[in-house]
Image: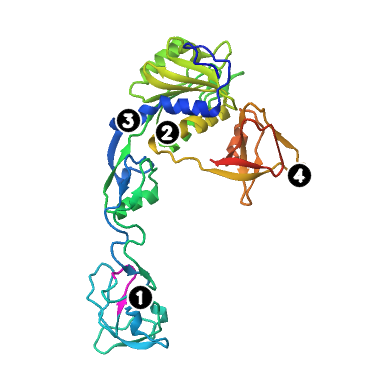
Amino acid sequence: MTSHTQHGRVQHTARSVAEHAAAVADLLQQFGAADRTETLPLSQALGRGLVHGFLAPLSLPPFANSQMDGYAVRSADIPDGGTELRIMPPVPAGSSPQPLAPGTAAPIMTGAMIPAGADAVVPIEKAKPDHFLPEGDGAIVTLPATARGTYVRVAGSDIAAGERALAAGTCLGPAQLGLLAALGMPDVEVYKAVTVLLVTTGDEVVEPGRPLPPGKIYDSNGTLLEAAMKQAGLAVRRTGISTDNPAALQAMLRTEGQGADLIVTTGGVSKGAYEVVRQAMADQPVDFLHVAMQPGGPQGLGTFDGVPFLGFPGNPVSCLVSFEMFLRPALSELLGTPARRLPLRARLDLGEAGGKLTSPGYKHQVRRGNLRPDGTVKLEGGESSHLMHALAGSNVLVHVPAGVTELADGDEVEVWML
């Protein structure tokens, strides 16, 4: 593509999706700075990105323990046909048991420490009697032969002390926070949440719940993007809808943007006569360009009064696709959160009539679809960027990369789960 334009001017050569994704990540690089971290208790760290990888300070489990309720035994004490063993005092979970004497069996509960000398556990269902006996001298239990290690969780079988526990940049979900707790860590250093100012623009846009005059539409972009951003861990600040007055938009951004880390607008970035965002950014280091993507081609990128700025198109599907293709991956790369969309492969189901999926060869097309349990994906709606009902009925984004002009029924495609 051509080099960057002067501020406020539109580039005429389309930038590739990969190039624009890299440019967005570069713009937001400061979000991963060392001064943008904080230490939080585990209960407040859900969905945050881990700053530093770390090694396990202890083994999990920290000691050999029983996987079952049963009897801890020395496997060598029991011949192939089984035998009678004298019963030792029981071993409840959390206790420190005495060593197991030869020719004895110790009742043991799930999770309890394996006594020294024991090397296997016989489940209570296989014992005779198949219930625990009251404590007392001379109590005997008959147990079958069992192999060494049976139903024993070995110390360090999950993770050994000194092994890598989590890598830097890991998104902390329930499982990761559970691991930190199991390793005895009460808090964790994470990246600070990014605060974004989200602005919808357009004289034609009306807040939901108000009367809808002729020629007007309700604002879906604000709700759509706010929900996507919150789901991705962003702290979202909404403004009222901006009119198509550039000076008013500039004033709104300066007033409402105090303390924001990022400004995102929707609409006003194309080549029309009333592109308010483009006009409001005329004196700012912002480039307006076209990305070889459908939908979501028109994009804005730069800074407003030093604050990183992204200008998304105004059609609802376009703005969500822009978020998924550019902002979400950049945050994942820099902060570890949100978790990346993992690519899956699926086979196109174009219906009984078959037919073709066509795409402009120079663009990366993103369609909406439903991924089914059998691994097929059915497209929802057409390629147009206003089809909110089709988007609401979809569970995946379907990718048709640049260079592919036609796909047939049964062809394999990449999909991202929504």
The amino acid pointed to by label 3 is Ala
Dominant secondary structure (helix, strand or loop) of the stretch shown in magenta: loop
Can you identify the residue that label 1 sits on? 120
Q: What separation in Å lies between label 2 and label 1 (alpha carbons)? A: 49 Å
Task: Report x, y in % for residue 279.
Answer: 49, 11
Range of magenta residues: 106-113
Q: Nearer the viewer, mark 4 or mark 3?
A: 3
Residue at horizontal 27%, vertical 45%? 187
Q: The residue tagged with tag 4: helix, strand or loop?
A: loop
Q: What separation in Å lies between label 4 and label 2 (alpha carbons)? A: 41 Å
Residue at horizontal 39%, vertical 83%? 127
Task: Report if the CB atoms under discs 3 and 2 are less than 8 Å apart.
Answer: no
Q: The residue tagged with tag 2: helix, strand or loop?
A: helix
- Is residue 55 positioned above or below 254 on the image? below
Residue at horizontal 53%, vertical 18%? 289
Q: What separation in Å lies between label 3 and label 2 (alpha carbons)? A: 13 Å
The amino acid pointed to by label 2 is Leu
- Identify the mark at residue 33; answer none if there is no mark: 3
